[in-house]
């Protein structure tokens, strides 16, 4: 009672306020700085097919070197028939696991679930066949990424896949920040096929600008839909353009003030538990959410679905 009585003195009030503010300051000081974050994921790898420059081993190592340089832990979503079903390609995939990166499933041969000639059972078998190979790799996770980001164009395929993933314990490894790096990679290879010594500076700049534009657009969309910055999961590919310029992509994100997190950290956010209610779900999770909510063709929508047309046309205008 004496303490309670003394607590109401001016000195006690000042002491309480001081202790309260000290507690708040200490709490804030140990909280991590909040910033927009991004997790790096790569599809379709490891590819053993040839490119005009760099061997399969060189491309794979260049990607791993760029990630190691920046201390980034990423995820590789394996399409096994691209090489992991062969000893040489399996070794490339294993190098990712050995380096501490996650390994996920991206089917055996990359079929399209929306193909009317492909049955639900055939698509599911593709996942199981790939799993038999990648489950022996270090870093293996029960993560599945839909090919073409298409989750079924009929209720039977959509619901059948959701039930299949749940039954087998797979996470839907959503993408929030979709890119058209594959389209610019096609242009890069087209130019190098004509001239392996070609000046690639315009393509590099177009690529970095493309990544920046998509990142800012999807960040704005997350704020519109969720009222906050979600940890973005970017989709890139195991290809030549990233073997050449992945380090520049990571540097650009850092210069934009974005932090880089692991895919597991990003997937722990509640937004990645959502299942947009659409007849044919898919694409970026954020785009799928927008369509589920009836947002329609919002400002900037076209630049998110043009598959890099804007950048390609600009390169053509520059003579590429």
Image (spheres, rainbow, N blue to C red):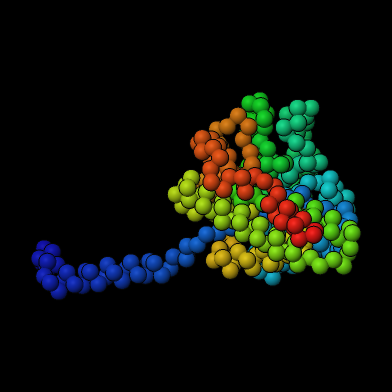
- Count of marks overlaid on the render: 0
**Above or below for 22 versus 212:** below
**Above or below for 265 versus 112:** below
Is residue 115 or residue 302 the one in the foreground?
302
Q: Residue at x 64, y 68 (%)?
A: 251
**Above or below for 310 versus 123:** below
Measured from the top left, where is residue 130 in percent x and y? Answer: 78, 42
Give residue 65's quadrant in the image: bottom right
Is residue 12 or residue 255 the one in the foreground?
255
Left or right of 298? Residue 212 is right
**Residue 91 showing in the rendered view:** no
Measured from the top left, where is residue 68 in percent x and y? Answer: 70, 68
Left or right of 298? Residue 125 is right
Quadrant assignment for the C terminus? bottom right
Q: Residue at x 62, y 59 (%)?
A: 212
Is residue 317 or residue 265 the one in the foreground?
317
Q: Residue at x 56, y 52 (%)?
A: 217
**Residue 125 showing in the rendered view:** yes
Q: Residue at x 29, y 69 (%)?
A: 21
Measured from the top left, where is residue 256 in percent x and y? Answer: 56, 65
Quadrant assignment for the N terminus? bottom left
């Amino acid at each position: 009672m004496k303490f309670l009585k003394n607590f109401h003195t001016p000195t006690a009030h000042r002491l309480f306020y001081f202790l309260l503010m000290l507690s708040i300051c200490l709490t804030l000081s140990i909280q991590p700085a909040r910033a927009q974050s991004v997790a790096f994921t790569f599809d379709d790898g490891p590819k053993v097919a040839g490119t005009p420059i760099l061997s399969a081993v060189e491309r794979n190592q260049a990607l791993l070197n760029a990630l190691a340089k920046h201390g980034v832990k990423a995820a590789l979503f394996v399409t096994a028939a691209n090489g992991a079903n062969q000893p040489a390609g399996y070794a490339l995939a294993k190098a990712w696991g050995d380096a501490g990166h996650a390994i996920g499933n991206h089917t055996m041969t990359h079929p399209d679930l929306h193909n009317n000639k492909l049955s639900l059972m055939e698509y599911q078998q593709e996942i199981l066949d790939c799993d038999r190979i990648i489950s022996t790799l270090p870093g293996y996770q029960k993560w599945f990424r839909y090919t073409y980001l298409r989750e079924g164009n009929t209720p039977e395929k959509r619901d059948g896949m959701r039930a299949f993933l749940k039954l087998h314990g797979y996470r839907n490894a959503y993408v929030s920040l979709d890119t058209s790096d594959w389209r610019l990679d096609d242009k890069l290879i087209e130019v190098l096929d004509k001239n392996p010594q070609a000046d690639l500076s315009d393509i590099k700049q177009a690529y970095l600008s493309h990544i920046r534009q998509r990142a800012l657009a999807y960040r704005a969309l997350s704020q519109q839909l969720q009222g906050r910055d979600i940890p973005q999961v970017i989709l890139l590919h195991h290809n030549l353009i990233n073997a050449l310029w992945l380090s520049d992509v990571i540097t650009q994100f850092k210069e934009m003030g974005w932090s880089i997190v692991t895919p597991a950290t990003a997937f722990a956010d509640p937004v990645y538990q959502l299942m947009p209610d659409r007849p044919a779900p898919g694409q970026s999770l954020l785009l799928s959410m927008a369509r589920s909510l009836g947002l329609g063709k919002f400002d900037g929508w076209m630049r998110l679905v043009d598959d890099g047309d804007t950048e390609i046309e600009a390169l053509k205008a520059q003579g590429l």
